Image (cartoon, rainbow, N blue to C red):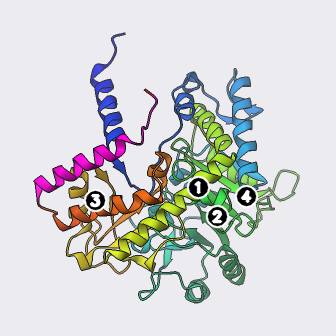
């Protein structure tokens, strides 16, 4: 077979873009060479419907070992009693949890997308808002932070079957203990979606949801620095509260319902090459080196937030406890869309983002979201954050000046030369 130069040329172009650019998308990261190697390995050839030891295909003895190692490492990393590593993505992890715990039309209480939540937490354009009945909580207009007493009031009024704690664009720690009190008060199940801060939670620098939430979902590719994928965990297995029984008449455990909701409920064959890459990433995340990385991610985010505030930028909630920040650009008289496009011309990648109480559409937006997970992997430190913020500020202040954008791009490329991404 001839090598497909058309696609490999494009892969090379993407590699160059990653090498030379400044990657500030809060949901992205750079995996290690060994994670990439596993993701591109012969395991992609293997069908393995089912779970280790209980497959619907022969020849699974090797992938059974791989998947078991991934599960055991994830349990150790998060202190979980049960883990399913098969969801192909964060969205599919959430889909499976809802399928196991809810009936169509049931009410769910999630974080409003325009305040920092995720599409799968009940947005009307997503299955979660079409199949279930969503109600939302949001942040306070004055402070930009969650008000748990208000969330409690909404929960008491709405009586949801499930409460979802977690976000895509919230820069503050989440009080899962308080969320559980609210859930218990109204008899709801509590799911935490820790897709964004998973790496920080795993290393204990943010509040731990595992002791408080019935079920926890995450992606594996953001601060956890693994391959693209999802995962479901429980701190403690429990009898399902829906009256679903085994043939023996005993209640089915929640772990069994969740496993069935992933496969065969929502997916077919698991991606064993990705599960191998997840196992490697979890092994990396168990090390002290990863702890130092995570501490640096947060130091960088806090240094960056401080530098933005010093230049008159309006950060939602005024700062950050994690790896990201959400910036309201309305006082700079530019939109999120304009800023994202101009930054891209300057070799800086961010995403436009709605800010709480935004008056612009999701295609335009008033804000941008910025994260430090990827640049920290490249080795940038607090001292570099002032430089990065100065480059962004130059773009925002000269949004239509192509020669300035080009000059910033040259500075970005120079800066990134100091932080090699791939081994030569
Ligand atoms: N949940 C949250 C909080 C997220 O931020 C994301 C991704 O951005 C997801 C779920 C979905 O993950 P995926 O893109 O893998 O479906």
Q: Residues within 10 Å of mark 1 (few under 14, many from 20)?
A: many
Pick the residue in front: 378 or 341.
378
- Report the magenta residues as a range: 401-423
**Which image quadrant: the C terminus?**
top left
Q: Nearer the viewer, mark 3 or mark 2?
A: 3
Q: Nearer the viewer, mark 4 or mark 3?
A: 3
Secondary element at tag 3? helix
Q: First in sequence: mark 4 or mark 3?
A: 4
Residue at (64% x, 64% y) in the render? 205
- Residue 189 at what x, y percent from top left? 68, 70
Disc 3 and disc 2: Cα gap in Å? 29 Å
Secondary structure of residue under mark 1 = helix
Identify the residue shown where x is 84% and y is 50%. Answer: 247
Residue 384 is covered by the magenta coloring? no
Spatial CA distance of label 1 from label 3 is 24 Å
Instruction: Give the dominant element type of the magenta stretch: helix, strand or loop.
Output: helix
As displayed, is residue 385 above or below residue 379?
A: below
Percent of width and height locating residue 192: 62, 65
318 relative to 53, above or below: below
Of labels 1 and 4, earlier in sequence is 4
- The numbered dot on residue 294 is 1
Q: Compute the Cα span from label 1 to label 2.
A: 8 Å
Q: Earlier in the sequence, mark 3 or mark 2?
A: 2
Mark closer to the observer (4, 2): 2
Disc 2 element: loop
Question: Compared to 256, does 172 lie above or below?
Answer: below
Question: Where is mark 4, residue-wise?
Answer: 234
The answer to whether residue 131 of the structure is visible from this angle is no
Disc 4 and disc 2 in contact, CB within 8 angstroms: no
| Mark earlier in primary sequence (1, 2) | 2
Residue ID for mark 2: 205
């Amino acid at each position: 077979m001839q090598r497909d130069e058309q696609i490999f040329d494009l892969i090379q172009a993407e590699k160059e873009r990653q090498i030379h650019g400044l990657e500030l998308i809060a949901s992205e990261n750079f995996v290690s060479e060994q994670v990439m190697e596993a993701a591109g390995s012969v395991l992609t050839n293997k069908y393995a419907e089912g779970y280790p030891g209980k497959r619907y295909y022969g020849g699974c003895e090797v992938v059974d070992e791989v998947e078991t190692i991934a599960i055991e490492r994830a349990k150790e990393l998060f202190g979980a009693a049960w883990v399913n590593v098969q969801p192909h993505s964060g969205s599919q992890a959430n889909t499976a949890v809802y399928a196991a715990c809810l009936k169509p039309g049931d009410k769910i209480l999630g974080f409003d997308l325009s305040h920092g939540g995720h599409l799968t937490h009940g947005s009307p354009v997503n299955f979660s808002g079409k199949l279930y009945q969503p109600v939302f909580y949001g942040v306070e207009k004055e402070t930009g932070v969650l008000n748990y007493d208000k969330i409690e009031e909404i929960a008491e009024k709405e009586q949801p079957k499930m409460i979802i704690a977690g976000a895509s664009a919230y820069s503050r720690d989440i009080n899962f203990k308080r969320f559980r009190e609210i859930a218990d008060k109204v008899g709801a199940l509590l799911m935490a979606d820790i897709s964004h801060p998973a790496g920080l939670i795993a290393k204990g620098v943010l509040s731990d949801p595992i002791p408080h939430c019935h079920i926890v979902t995450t992606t594996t590719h953001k601060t956890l620095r693994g391959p693209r994928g999802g995962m479901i965990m429980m701190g403690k297995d429990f009898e399902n509260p829906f009256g679903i029984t085994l043939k023996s008449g005993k209640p089915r455990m929640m772990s069994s319902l969740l496993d069935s909701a992933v496969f065969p409920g929502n997916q077919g064959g698991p991606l064993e090459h990705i599960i191998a890459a997840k196992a490697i990433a979890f092994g990396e995340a168990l090390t002290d080196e990863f702890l130092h990385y995570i501490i640096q991610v947060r130091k960088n985010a806090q240094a960056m937030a401080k530098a933005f505030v010093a230049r008159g930028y309006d950060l939602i909630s005024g700062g950050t406890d994690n790896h990201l920040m959400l910036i309201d650009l309305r006082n700079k008289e530019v939109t999120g869309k304009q800023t994202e496009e101009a930054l891209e011309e300057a070799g800086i990648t961010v995403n436009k983002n709605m800010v709480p109480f935004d008056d612009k559409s999701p295609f335009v937006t008033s804000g941008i979201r910025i994260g430090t997970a990827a640049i920290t992997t490249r080795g940038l430190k607090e001292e570099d954050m002032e430089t990065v913020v100065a480059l962004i500020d130059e773009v925002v202040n000269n949004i239509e000046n192509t020669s300035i954008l080009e000059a910033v791009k040259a500075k970005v490329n120079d800066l990134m030369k100091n932080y090699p991404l791939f081994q030569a």
